[in-house]
Image: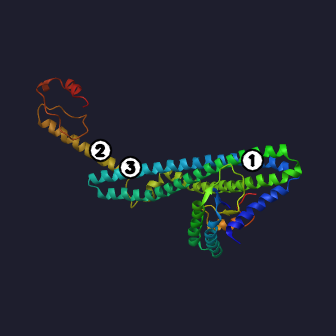
Amino acid sequence: MIVRILAEGQWDISEDHLTRLNELDAQVETAVEVGDEVTFSSTLAALLDEVRKGGSTLADDSLVDSDLILPPADATLAEVRELLNDDGLIPG
Amino acid sequence: MSLMKRISLIFRSKANRALDRAEDPRETLDYSYQRQIELLSKVRRGVADVATSRKRVELQANQLEQQSQKLHDQAQKALSMGREDLAREALTRKSGLVGQLNDLKAQQAQLQGEEEKLTLASQRLQAKVESFRTRKETIKATYTAAEAQTKINEAFSGISEEMGDVGMAVQRAEDKTAQMQARAGAIDELISSGALDDASQVGQGDDISRELEAMSSDSDVESELAALKAGSSGATAPPAIESTDSTPPAPEEPQSQRPQSQQQREEGPA
């Protein structure tokens, strides 16, 4: 499974890491929904760490799209909200 | 639905919309390649812009550092002259600078981080663009329009996700740099107007260095005067008009009866 951390690159993650990723992902998502900045930054950091630790980086010249995409490490809660809005941050 | 999944779907739908617009899918390849090249030069410009901002902040930090060192020296000098009030004022001004300096250092670190990230992004994009170009040529040479579709989709979605990512990174770096430039501009103005010196000034009073200068030229006069007095009391001692320190003239040597000008030449600078 290919996971991208925006502004960092792509990782190949084995399936057995997925459960932990999904747990953390759900926590980040809840934090975004309720607008809890503190939980948001700590869980996002944990989620990204899990990807970096548990995966192997893809070569720079690989051209594959990702199954999962994560916000950049320094993203704010507001930016993630905007990211989830189709007309938001991603240049067309 | 999962946050990670939602973001990836948004990226994918953007890529699909771009693909759908083309009549002959092979045209998409050339068009996309053009845009990749444009984006690549945009990222490189971004790296250069961030570097310029970082250097500007570094320069300002150096200026403030010098200013703060100067105030520290002044405080020391004032204290050695028994002017605790002046030393206190110098240190108060210095503490005003420290906040600004810490702020600048934080900005500098942030810009450095941005610069590194963009540099890496530009390297990744470059590698992917190169890989895309190779694949594009293969696809155009080997497949008919109908056959090419799947191959094109594969190549296209991979690069288009990268382009979305890099495009976003450049945009964010630009935003951050613009914010910092506004603050850097304000600090430049402060430095050039000298207002920073007064920003934390307590009470009234002369500028510290002017006062210290006045004090030290006073004490120079005193020490010269003392030297003169010492000179006139010893009958043969040469006057020490040129000397600016308070050390008494060197002990006389037997041949001190020579004309004075000659003796001064020989004793010259130590």
Relative depth, front residue between B36 and B172 = B36
x 39%, y 50%: residue: B69
Q: Chain of mark 2?
A: B
Above or below, B55 relative to B161: above
Q: Would residue B235 be found to the left or right of residue B172 on screen?
A: left
Residue designated by label 3: B70
On the image, the x and y values in percent for residue A24 come to 61, 70
Relative depth, front residue between B231 and B27 = B27
Q: Is residue B24 visible in this depiction of the protein?
A: no
> Which mark lies nearer to you, 3 or 1?
1
On the image, the x and y values in percent for residue B152 come to 81, 52
Residue designated by label 2: B217
What kind of element bears circle 2? helix
Q: Amino acid at mark 3?
A: Lys
Q: Amino acid at mark 1?
A: Phe
Q: CA distance from mark 1 to mark 2?
A: 74 Å
> Which mark lies nearer to you, 1 or 2?
1
Above or below, B175 relative to B137: below
